[in-house]
Image (spheres, rainbow, N blue to C red):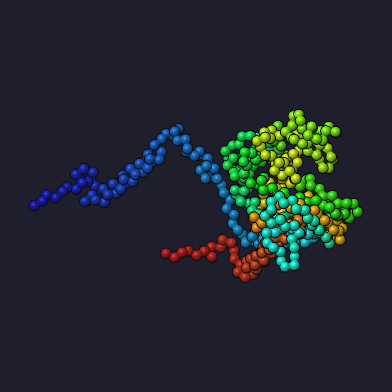
Amino acid sequence: MSTPRPNASASSGSGGDEGGTPLSSSLRQRKNKSNHTTSMEDDEDSVLSLSEQTNRPKDVALQQQRVNAWHPILDPTWVIVALLYIGVIMVPVGWKMWTLSNSVTEYSIKYDDYQPPPMGQELACPINNTFNAGRKCNLTITVNEYMKPPVLVYYQLTNFYQNYRKYAKSFDPYQLYGRVGSQDAVSRQNCEPLNILGNMTLNPCGLIANTFFNDIFRLVEGRAATGKRLQMREDGIAWQSDLEYMYNQPDGFNFSECPSNGCDASCCAVGSSCTTPWKDPETGKCYRYYYPDDDTTQYLYETYPDIISPIEGVTNEHFVVWMRVAPLRNFRKLYGWFDQPIDAGTKLVFEVTANYAVTPFKGGKALLITSNNIFGGKNIYTALFMLVLGAFCLVSAFFFLFEHFAWKPRKLADVANLRYKEE
C-alpha cells in the first residue's frame, strides 16, 4: 500500500488553501511572468550601458515619432468649396491657353527622312547614309499670316533617343569646363566608347558631343515687314546659366588677332598651335590660337570645322543647345531667330547644308519657324489638361453639392449613422 505524497504548500509551511494547487499555480505564473519581463529588460537595456549605446535614438519628439500631426477631416462643405475654386480657376486659364496656342503661327518643311515620301512628293535634301555629305539645298517657306517678333527657327529630329540613360550621362562635365588631360574613373567610364579615337583623345568626349547635329542653315532670301532684309540671329539661343557655369575653353587656351597684313601661316609661327589662322567670316579679321596638347587631342573645332570656330570651341551656342538633351524621341531645338516682323505672303528661302544622316536611326529632319506666346510655342496639350481637370472638378463639386444638401443630407460624425460589426 503506497503512502500518499504530502501537499507541497502544507509541507513548505505556507499554510495555503486546501489542496494547495490553485494558489501555487497562480504564484508560479506570476513568478514566471516576472522572470520573463526581467529577462527581456536585461536583453534590451542591460547588454550595454546607456553611454555605450551610440546608435540609440535621442529622446526627442522627431526621432521618437511623437511630433504632433494634423489629421484633417474632409468636411463635405469644404471639399465642395475647394473643388469649385479649382474648377473656376482652371477652366478660364485652360481656355486662355487654348486660344493663345491657336494664335501661334507655325510652318515646317521636312527635308530628309529614312522612309521614301508618298507618290508624287519629294524630299528636299535627302542624303541617306552619307555622313558629312555637304549637300546644299534650298528650302522655301511661304508665310501666310503676319508674324510678330521674335520669330523662332528650329530644327526638328524624329526617332532620336537622347533620353537613353547611357546617352544622357555620356559626357565629362570637368572637361567641358576646361580641364585638359587626366580624367577621373567615373567620367572615363561615362565617355566610353567615344573617349579615344585611334591615338587621339577626344575633347569633349562622350556620345552627346560626338553626335552633334551639324546641318547648317542660312537665310538667303526674305524681307521683314519694314522692307529691310531679314537677318537670322544665332546668338542668345542657349541658356545663359549654361554658358556661364558649364562651358569654358580648355585651360591654357588663348588667342590673339593677327597683324593686318599677316593673315597667313606666318601669323601662327610663334606661341600658337595653329597651322593657319582662323578668319572671321563677318569681320574678315584673322586670329591665331593656342590649344594645349593639340598634337594628342582632337578638339571640337577639329571634329566640326564647318560649324565650330577654334575661338569659340565648346562655348558655341549651337553646341550648348545640343548638349541639353531632350526628354522625348521627337524633339526640336532652337537654331536661330528673327527680331523683325514678317508680313503675310513673304517667302523665306533657307540654304541648308545637309551633313547629318538620319537613316541609321530611322528618323527624319525638318526645318520649322514659329511665333510664340507667354506660355511658349504651339502646345494644346497643357491647355487640354487644364480644361479637362477643371471641368472634372466642377462636375464633382455639383454632384457632391446635390448629394450632400438635396439627395441624402447627413450630419458629419452623427452617431446615429454608426454601425458596429456584429460578433
- Say whether residue 352 is left or right of residue 226: left
Of all residues shown, which one is farthest toward the bottom? 407
Of all residues shown, which one is farthest toward the right? 227
Of all residues shown, which one is farthest toward the top? 270
The x and y percentages for residue 92 are 75, 61
Q: Nearer the viewer, residue 228 or 25?
A: 228
Q: Nearer the viewer, residue 384 or 164?
A: 164
- Say whether residue 150 is left or right of residue 35: right
The x and y percentages for residue 343 are 87, 58
Residue 150 seen in the current view: no
The correct choice, above or below, for 55 with respect to 398 in the image is above
Of all residues shown, which one is farthest toward the left? 1
Residue 356 seen in the current view: yes
Residue at figure coordinates x 46%, y 64% from the top left:
421
Quadrant where the C terminus sits is bottom left
Residue at figure coordinates x 79%, y 57% from the top left:
139
Residue at figure coordinates x 79%, y 45% from the top left:
235
The x and y percentages for residue 22 are 26, 51
- Say whether residue 313 is left or right of residue 172: right
